[in-house]
């Protein structure tokens, strides 16, 4: 019979006269260094040592054992963001950083392997009550959407840590926003609906003499603000009444401009120009020619459609400010400039534009995105359905005998 050496060793008496038990076990290759790693554990009793040795060896055999490390949540988030930066747009990574900054303050200094589901739940509850960190409203609740986004990014980062064998389990995987918090926010949050047909028409009629008439019409035909600001005259075919959406100009934190291609492959698209928009663009181009002639060499030839009188391009922030000022002057409800897309696509959908055309116009891969986020019929839009229902009962409406 072959006797294997006992992995648990009895140590000499310590300074307090106590016997202790110790083992050293191979826990595999450290994914960070590529070197084999050993774990040394010491216990006051043989029973405790045997139990932990059995636990570690069982986990090693079933693949659930990960080598110990001292990486903190902050350190891992930094590395994860660096990895994601290879595949994502600069603006997307910027938003990821802002989203995860909400997590770092309370969880960032915890060792990754010490992070628990309870830690994440405590952060969620704190964020829903006091999570806003900047400005005059610091210490007030973060919105459910903001907390949800931070949770989503944290789950994604921890999921990658699992595949890297830095942790065994994603402790944030089952942490969600409580239903009561969602219901409370829906009850108290004022939802600003996009403009209806009458409001759109009032705006269009009210800005006919506005220098940015053409640019604002482009917004009302469903272009994103970044697409309006990124549109170049080389992308506009006035003869064939078409435009090519291929370039965008957005902003990072309202501080500096980022120019890039469209949000997705579907976002790069050719669109026909409605007669009203075509006429406005022709007039705007003629106006810019006059402005260039008047300024001479002082004029900046940027090539963009949306430019100031001296030729320098508008930023999204400047376009929004002008649009909001015009809303105020015309006595219209203030809505986000981006919501002009909703007004456009709701009108097109209500008037029978086929789904595949609607998605293509919006720059979406499929119409589910368009209909879920941008088609928002109001009660007036639903009156046609009420009229149709009247035919269901087959009788004369009460009071109309």
Image (cartoon, rainbow, N blue to C red):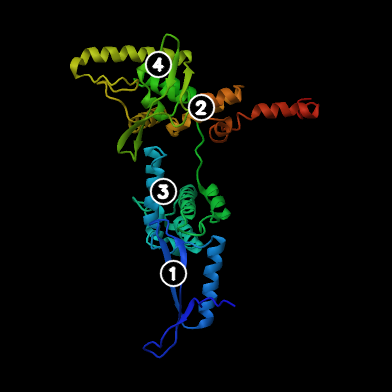
SS under mark 4: strand
| Residue 377 in sight | no
Looking at the rendered structure, which numbered label has been put on residue 236? 4
Q: Which residue is mark 2?
A: 362
SS under mark 1: strand
Give the mark, 3 or 2, whose residue is nearer the N terminus.
3
Q: Nearer the viewer, residue 187 or 84?
A: 84
Say whether marks 3 and 1 touch (CB < 8 Å): no
In three-dimensional space, the C-alpha distance between marks 3 and 2, rounded to whole angstroms, equals: 27 Å
Q: Which residue is mark 1?
A: 39
Residue 100 at x, y = what percent?
41, 51
In three-dimensional space, the C-alpha distance between marks 1 and 4, rounded to whole angstroms, equals: 67 Å
Q: Which residue is mark 3?
A: 99
Say if 146 sits above or below 52 in the image: above
Residue at the outermost left position: 297
In three-dimensional space, the C-alpha distance between marks 2 and 4, rounded to whole angstroms, equals: 18 Å
In three-dimensional space, the C-alpha distance between marks 4 and 3, rounded to whole angstroms, equals: 37 Å
SS under mark 3: helix
Kindly indicate the quadrant of the structure image that contains residue 332. Answer: top left
């Amino acid at each position: 019979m072959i006797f294997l050496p006992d992995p648990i060793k009895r140590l000499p008496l310590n300074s307090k006269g106590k016997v202790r038990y110790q083992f050293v076990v191979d826990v595999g290759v450290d994914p960070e260094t590529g070197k084999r790693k050993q774990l040394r554990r010491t216990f006051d009793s043989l029973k405790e040592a045997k139990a932990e040795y059995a636990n570690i060896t069982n986990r090693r055999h079933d693949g659930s054992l990960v080598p110990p490390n001292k990486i903190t949540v902050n350190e891992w988030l930094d590395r994860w963001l660096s990895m994601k930066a290879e595949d994502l747009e600069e603006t997307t990574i910027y938003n990821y950083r802002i989203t995860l900054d909400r997590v770092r303050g309370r969880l960032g200094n915890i060792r990754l392997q010490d992070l628990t589901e309870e830690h994440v739940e405590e952060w969620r509850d704190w964020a829903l009550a006091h999570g806003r960190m900047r400005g005059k409203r610091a210490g007030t609740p973060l919105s459910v959407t903001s907390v949800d986004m931070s949770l989503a990014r944290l789950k994604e980062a921890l999921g990658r840590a699992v595949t890297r064998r830095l942790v065994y389990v994603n402790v944030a995987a089952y942490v969600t926003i409580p239903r009561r918090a969602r219901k409370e926010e829906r009850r108290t949050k004022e939802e600003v609906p996009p403009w209806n047909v009458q409001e759109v028409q009032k705006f269009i009629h009210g800005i006919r003499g506005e220098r940015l008439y053409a640019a604002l019409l482009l917004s009302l035909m469903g272009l994103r603000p970044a697409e309006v600001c990124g549109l170049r005259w080389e992308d506009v075919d006035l003869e064939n009444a078409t435009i090519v959406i291929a370039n965008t100009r957005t902003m990072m934190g309202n501080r500096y401009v980022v120019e890039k291609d469209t949000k997705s492959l579907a976002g790069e698209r050719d669109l026909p120009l409605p007669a009203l928009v075509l006429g406005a663009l022709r007039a705007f181009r003629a106006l810019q020619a006059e402005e260039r002639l008047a300024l001479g060499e002082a004029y900046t030839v940027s090539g963009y459609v949306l430019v100031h009188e001296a030729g320098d391009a508008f930023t999204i922030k400047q376009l929004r400010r002008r649009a909001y000022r015009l809303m105020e002057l015309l006595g219209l409800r203030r809505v986000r400039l981006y919501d002009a897309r909703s007004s456009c696509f709701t009108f097109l959908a209500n008037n029978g534009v086929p789904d595949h055309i609607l998605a293509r116009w919006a720059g979406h891969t499929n119409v589910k995105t368009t209909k879920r986020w941008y088609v928002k019929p109001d009660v007036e839009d639903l009156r046609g359905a009420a009229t149709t229902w009247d035919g269901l009962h087959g009788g004369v409406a009460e009071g109309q005998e």
